[in-house]
Amino acid sequence: MKKVLAINSGSSSFKYKLFSLPDEKVIASGMADRVGLDNASFEIKLADGNKHVEKTEIADQEAAVNLLIKFLKQFNVVDDLHEIVGVGHRVVNGGEYFTDSTIITKENLPKIYELEDYAPLHNPAEGRGIEAFMNVLPEVPQVAVFDTTYHRALDPVHYLYSLPYEYYEKYGVRKYGAHGTSVRYVAPRAADMMGKDLKDLKLIVCHLGSGASITAVKDGKSYDTSMGFSPLAGITMATRSGDIDPSLIQHLMHVEHKSMDEMIHILNHKSGLLGLSGISPDMRDVRESDTDRAKLARKIFINRIVRYVGSYIAEMGGVDAIIFTAGIGEHDMGVRKEVMDAFKYMGVEPDYEANEENGEHFITKPDSKVKAMVIPTNEELIIERDVVRLTDIN
């Protein structure tokens, strides 16, 4: 049986699904959770519903790859590694190099590393993950599916910065966005749930996970998005600051006697929920804490979501639906409630009882002018389909 492995590496997670072809049946799935953090775990769920979870140290994405191979063999999901005929990898930023999903070779792999500054928490780890699979499965095509591809549809009004134009011409300085692979799944699914053509809808997708972004979808494509040149921009995240005044960086460099590289490291790794709360980058930990700083961190996180959603409603001239997805979006009913309440004036009529449940469903009343819904993302399915499309495996 032919099988395709879809790898979705986040900044602190490692999700995977193994698909059989051509039926696209998921025969194994799971994740490494809290990668690089305390209390990490690795999970594998088999097609028969049996699940195994092991608490173990997972230092980085490479360690997660090695654990994946170990578990696939241990539970006889793969008897021979040659059954895997393609591996797809979510890669956050393709820059100007990659305008579509691409088969990765030793010749073009360095370009993913060259884009480290564009996605410092992701691209290097994803590059190492691709390399690891190249070593284990040297004859199997490795396909990179770039989050930035979806946002190639942005108008220059939305992707250009107010900088000297030659910086864009010389260096490709622009907004690239991220989480495009997630939106590629979630937006059409929302249209299906609403019984409408995607091209006729104005949607706002709140991808709220360790990395978090807000994307406006209009005319069936990306209209604007909160992440920028790198995933550092936009709303408050687990360890990323989100939007910040550049002059403040210069000020902190002077008073803290730090280099630019040190400051960027702080903005990427020590800010966000972690920096504000002083407790954890994980919203589950922040939510359970009674400290004033943790409560404030949560309020700031919600405020930045509302700020972006509101601005995109204004940009698009209205909205038909607000969608919550990814770890926080799919499981934190409190965040969803606060965001919905903020837009009651726009016609959002929350169904608080429905909001207490997770899974794919509407969380507004049937007659709500603006719908709100939870849609668990399925980036892995998009990745698998791109592997098949580019390699003609079937």
Image (cartoon, grey):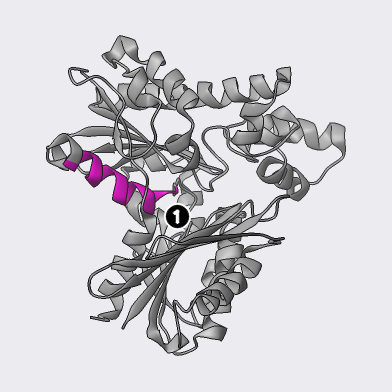
What type is the residue that disc 1 sits on? Glu
Residue 374, above or below 107: above
- Tell me the quarter of the image containing the C terminus: bottom left
- Tell me the quarter of the image containing the N terminus: bottom left
- Would residue 289 appear left or right of 25 to someone viewing this image? right
Label 1: few (<14), some (14–19) or many (≥20) C-alpha neighbours in 10 Å: few
State the residue in front, 28 or 389: 28
Q: Main secondary structure of the magenta part?
A: helix
- Would residue 219 appear left or right of 375 to someone viewing this image? left
Secondary structure, mark 1, is: helix
Residue 42, above or below 342: below
Q: Position of residue 246 (x, y in %)?
A: 65, 34
- Would residue 224 appear left or right of 116 to someone viewing this image? left
Queried whether the magenta region covers residue 212, the answer comes back as: no
Q: Position of residue 204 (x, y in %)?
A: 33, 33
Queried whether the magenta region covers residue 190, the answer comes back as: yes
Is any part of residue 209 visible from this angle?
yes
Q: Residue at x 61, y 52 (%)?
A: 12
Q: Give the magenta range.
A: 178-192
State the residue in front, 188 or 107: 188
Residue farthest to the top? 345
Q: Residue at x 68, y 30 (%)?
A: 247
Q: Position of residue 56 (x, y in %)?
A: 69, 61
Is any part of residue 153 visible from this angle?
no
Q: Position of residue 15 (x, y in %)?
A: 49, 59
Indicate the quadrant where residue 127 lies: bottom right
Q: Residue at x 45, y 85 (%)?
A: 79
- Would residue 248 appear left or right of 104 to someone viewing this image? right
| Residue picked out by circle 1 | 169
